[in-house]
Amino acid sequence: MERRNLGCAVSPVLRDACVFLAKYASVMLGCGATCSRIQRNIDRMALAAGYRVELTILPAHCFVTLTDAEGMSYSHSYTIEHLPNDYALNTRLSHLSWRVADGKITIDEAAEEFPRLLRCQRYHDWVTLLLVTAANASFCRIFGGDRVAMCIVALATMVGFSLKLLLTRARVNYMIMTMACAFTAAVAGTAGYVFDGITSTPEVALATSVLFLIPGIPYINSVNDLLTDHYLCGFSRFIKATIITACITVGLTAAFFLMKISFTDL
């Protein structure tokens, strides 16, 4: 959505800068940046280019209004890009804003470089799978699981996370995806109960088998947004994180019923 001064010709430079900043903000929000970080990045680029900027961040849109030295203003809104949490991309985009602020590049050059930063290679799915598997198995050990329990958690994580990758590519609704992945990982995590005696800590293996699904980043970002007065986004992120947590609970409970495991066994 665009808004401009009626009856006046808007400078193409002003228009292009506003469109770029709106898309920049939407991408940063979509890949896991906090609202305060986005605000700082946008402010420093606009200031370096000689513009006054107003940024409104909503749960589904980013709205940017730029005003130049002559008082001409232009507004543009952009739908939030729903991307995987990617701190490497956030770092690259923040570095881009500092280059503009330091005068190393202009805002027009930043707009030209922006698509290339988005195309930068992320970690391969196999690398991510191995790292997530190792991390979840380590959590099992931290919570007191033995070596066999760690192996069970590693297997459960590999199965559950592989399913998550497949469902994400198929654009399955995140709630259905979370329940399916939690159910699959939890069923694999009950191996310590199914094969009695192979581990002395089957409850730890089962409890930690779904930790890779916990929405830690949305919870942290929601608190940060609330503390920096971005209440709408903070509340929205908290609600989504709560829904994901509830979906994990549904999948885990379904696995308990299927495998006939009582809560008293934990």
Image: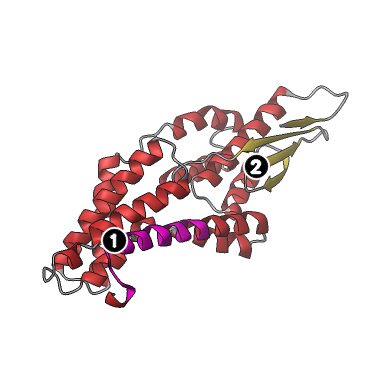
- Horizontal side of residue 241 vs 134, given as left or right: right
Residue 252 placement: quadrant: bottom left
Looking at the picture, does residue 98 appear above or below residue 223?
above
In x, y percent, where is residue 41? Answer: 59, 46
Residue 31 - label: none
Determine the secondary structure under disc 2: strand
Residue 171 placement: quadrant: top left
Residue at the spot of label 1: 209
Residue drawn at x 27%, y 57% is 187
Residue 62 - label: 2
Residue drawn at x 35%, y 51% is 181
Residue drawn at x 60%, y 28% is 108
Q: Nearer the viewer, mark 2 or mark 1?
A: 1
In x, y percent, where is residue 158? Answer: 24, 50
Question: Can you see residue 211?
Answer: yes
Task: Give the main secondary structure, helix, strand or loop, of the magenta stretch.
Answer: helix
Question: Can you see residue 51?
Answer: no
Residue drawn at x 67%, y 61% is 229
Q: Of residues 218 and 105, which is closer to you in this image?
A: 218
Q: Of residues 121 and 236, which is closer to you in this image?
A: 236
The magenta stretch spans which residues? Answer: 242-263
What amino acid is found at the position of numbered circle 1 in the picture? Ser
Badge 1 density bin: few <14, some 14–19, many ≥20, Cα 10 Å: many
Determine the secondary structure under disc 1: loop
